[in-house]
Image (cartoon, grey):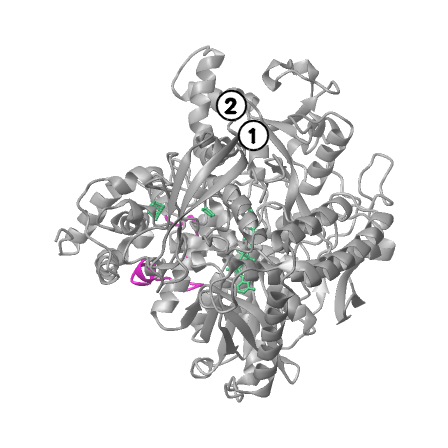
Amino acid sequence: MVNPANKRKLEIIIVGTGLAGASAAASLGELGYKVKAFCFQDSPRRAHSIAAQGGINAAKNYQNDGDSIFRLFYDTVKGGDYRARESNVHRLAEVSVNIIDQCVAQGVPFAREYGGLLNNRSFGGTQVKRTFYAAGQTGQQLLIGAYQALERQVALGNVEMHSRHEMLDMVTIDGKARGIICRNLVNGELERHFGHAVLLCTGGYGNVFYLSTNAMGSNVTAIWKAHKKGAMFGNPCFTQIHPTCIPVSGDHQSKLTLMSESLRNDGRIWVPKQKGETRKANDIPEEERDYYLERRYPAFGNLVPRDVASRAAKERCDAGYGVGTTKQAVYLDFKFNLINKYGKAEANKHGIENPDTETLIRLGKELVKEEYGNLFDMYEKITGENPYEVPMRIYPAVHYTMGGLWVDYELMTNVKGLYCLGEANFSDHGANRLGASALMQGLADGYFVVPYTIGNYLADEIATKPIPVSHEAFVQTEKAVKERIETLMNIKGKQTVESFHKRLGKIMWEKCGMARNAKGLQEAIKEIQELKKEFWTDVRIPGDINEMNPELDKAGRVADFIELGELMCKDALDRNESCGGHFREESQTEEGEAKRDDENFAYVSAWEFKGESNWELHKEKLEFEVAKPSQRSYK
Amino acid sequence: MEHYMMNLSLKVWRQKNAADKGGFVTYPVKNISSEMSFLEMIDVLNEELIRDGKDPIAFDHDCREGICGACSMYINGRPHGPWEANTTCQLHMRAYKDGDTIVIEPWRANAFPVIKDLVVDRSSFDRIIQAGGYISVNTGNAVDANAIAINKDNADASFAAASCIGCGACVAACKNSSALLFVSAKVSHLALLPQGEPERRSRALNMVAQMDKEGFGSCTNTGACEAVCPKEISIENIARLNREYMFAGASVSK
Ligand SMILES: Cc1cc2nc3c(=O)[nH]c(=O)nc-3n(C[C@H](O)[C@H](O)[C@H](O)COP(=O)(O)OP(=O)(O)OC[C@H]3O[C@@H](n4cnc5c(N)ncnc54)[C@H](O)[C@@H]3O)c2cc1C
Ligand code: SF4
Ligand code: FES
């Protein structure tokens, strides 16, 4: 513990102001620490947490359907296919209830029932309704809550906010994290910042695949630099491919858009029973539709976990049953519930007897609009089709990275004083994250975990005076960053940063994506190494160093993604089992389901950087005392 | 959806930095697919500029799905372009036809100085929030979330106001560069909830004072803000802000 007077003497650097970073900055500021926070966007309110749609889980049991902390813990461990650390997950489930209380107190306008109490919806991989939401904008509302709490601390002078700043390296002194080097993205100048501790809350690295549901700026740079300075990278290959995204429409595609999993509550997924079907969706009669999730997984139906739903969609498309122009899509159809669930409920309420289908659809629309309105509008803007009338076309896309910096129970990495929170760490989701659990984890880490655990470390730092940034370690680290930027600018090659990023993405998607095998992964490693050489000899970056230069920002990020890509393939190659989102073709059951190998792989892969293309694997053995591993079954 | 290709002429505002005077440059773009988003069309142009050894156009963007509020282009005289309730990143090229000329400028307002090309500095919005756009509750202070029931209509109206993405289109559309729609959305979000009650007076006063200090203009009720707001924030919020302000013992109309 650190007493209040001493807290003022302790400085904390927080990189990232998404749910994890903003909640940590606000809470640590309230406690009296001197906080400096950084983000690359022009405002902390724009972190990619803002885009989260469907909801946030909490074991409140407000629905009286038998939910409990234990059940949330159990679902999360099972959903993660027994590759998460039990203790961390249990703590997450415990604090989940406090998060909802805190958010409501801040004024987060969650959806409510007519009686004025909070409403819930269900999400995949669970059989209770424990997800709190605000239409399809839950992330936005939660982030605004955390952002406002953060701005309040800025106003009070407890937090110093640096927007449009990008962390480009970490400074360590005597083996402890002591600060960062960052670039002011407006004028290009490098800056040195000291902290008694450094918290990285920089989000996921799904953009290593080029196309993903992440924002354009989402990147791995901060944690990658920390990794190269000694922090171990946990389970880098664990990637979540989300089943319901708007499919790719052409080569120009710059990102993919998610259609929230909550839609699977009310949408039924199907493909035509006939191969090469040419009729329009609405012209295909009921008996000629294959509701393949309901067929294969009767117990969970459309609400199976994401990894299962994604693979099932790929299986159908690969077998020739895909729909749309590219045939790389399946239908997500709302008609049934629009009529039978929402329409009938409204008709009953208004006392309309024997309503015809038209009326039911009209009535149902109103309710569906309230539940998902913005998502339906978003779909229509992108595709030009109206999902109230025709089924959505969807396909899996890269969405979330369960891997990240390895952290202990206190969220500290193996580098003393370096913490990692939110999607950037590896901790709670094992090999597959359940829907609505990332928002929960980000806020748990920032509001209710790190404020307590960091005191254990800082208690021994009270006597450490702030280290002046003229210290040799700062000077040297800044020099290395400067040289790297100059090297990049001086290549003056022919190919654009974007073109390299696209090529990396293609290798990753094809060989380290939804299905992986040893041969493909070995090829991918070679191809990535070659791509790296080409990048460092032929990339072209326009403009100057000392000005706003988005191409230069992007070049640094892509260079890091290339290195990360290699490690991801190496990790995927090492893990010769299928678990959660990691599907090794060599390891499957006769029915094509993922086959886990607990005997040999019940461990966290923690990779230590040893030099170019060289890593050492450390294994953290996973013990399951309570949630005993079993073959996941959603049948 | 029928898909087609088009050639366009873009007139884009180029300005090297805050000190530069800036001016329009015309670029032809070819083979643009109607399925592209507006920003993907700019990506195509930028890739070409880089290959030709020229400086690409700088613009703010991140989520590309209409929620982060970063994108901010003033397109043919309208913030975020021609579609209703839409952001620049969600605008798709099927809004245009072959041969069209499109004029693209940054937000223009004293309180939003240009940083480069189409990128402006909107940190004034953060400072307005710092002035009072929050509920003062420390982590750990909260009571059970269901301890206070909230009338659903109020909760829904609060949510509608809270869906503001802080993009600044309202300011860009206003001939006085007033930020009142943005401020009123925040004041309404919090004033409609019982949790926001204790700070109602000071919040409205302090946020409006900060808005004035940042150099935003005053509101003359023309409604241009509401018409372009991508999140359909209603001008009724401005009326509510006026009531809040009066309730706090002052008057916003100056
Ligand atoms: C479209 C979409 C929908 C989702 N829906 C849900 C949902 O319904 N429920 C759910 O639980 N989860 C959902 N998720 C997942 C969830 O939103 C994220 O996992 C979570 O919000 C990540 O929060 P974070 O704080 O870790 O990171 P982010 O919110 O991504 O924040 C990262 C921060 O780090 C900063 N940063 C990054 N790199 C640097 C650097 N080098 N220097 C300086 N700053 C840097 C950024 O500026 C930003 O502030 C969704 C994700 C997506 C993409
Ligand atoms: S009120 Fe509307 S236009 Fe103004 S900042 Fe908010 S979302 Fe943008
Ligand atoms: S880029 Fe996020 S709203 Fe347009």
Query: Is residue A184 at least partly visible in the picture?
Result: yes
Q: Mark 1 and mark 2 in contact (Cβ < 8 Å)?
A: yes
User: x, y (%) of residue B83?
Assistant: 39, 34
* Residue for badge 2: A338
Whether B151 is among the magenta residues is no
Considering the numbered disc 2 on the image, is that residue within a helix, a strand or a loop?
helix
Query: Is residue A177 at least partly visible in the picture?
Result: no
**What amino acid type is highlighted by mark number 1?**
Asp
Prevailing SS of the magenta stretch: loop
Residue found at x 53% / y 49% = B46
Residue B114 numbered mark, or none: none
User: How many labels were placed on the picture?
Assistant: 2
* Residue for badge 1: A266
**What amino acid type is highlighted by mark number 2?**
Leu
The residues colored magenta run B127-148
User: Is B29 above or below relative to A206?
Assistant: above
For the residues beneath circles 2 and 1, the answer to whether they share a chain is: yes
**Frontmost residue, A629 versus A441:** A441
Specify the subunit that label 2 lies on.
A
> Could you tell whether A561 is left or right of A566 in the image?
left
Residue A269 found in image quarter:
top right
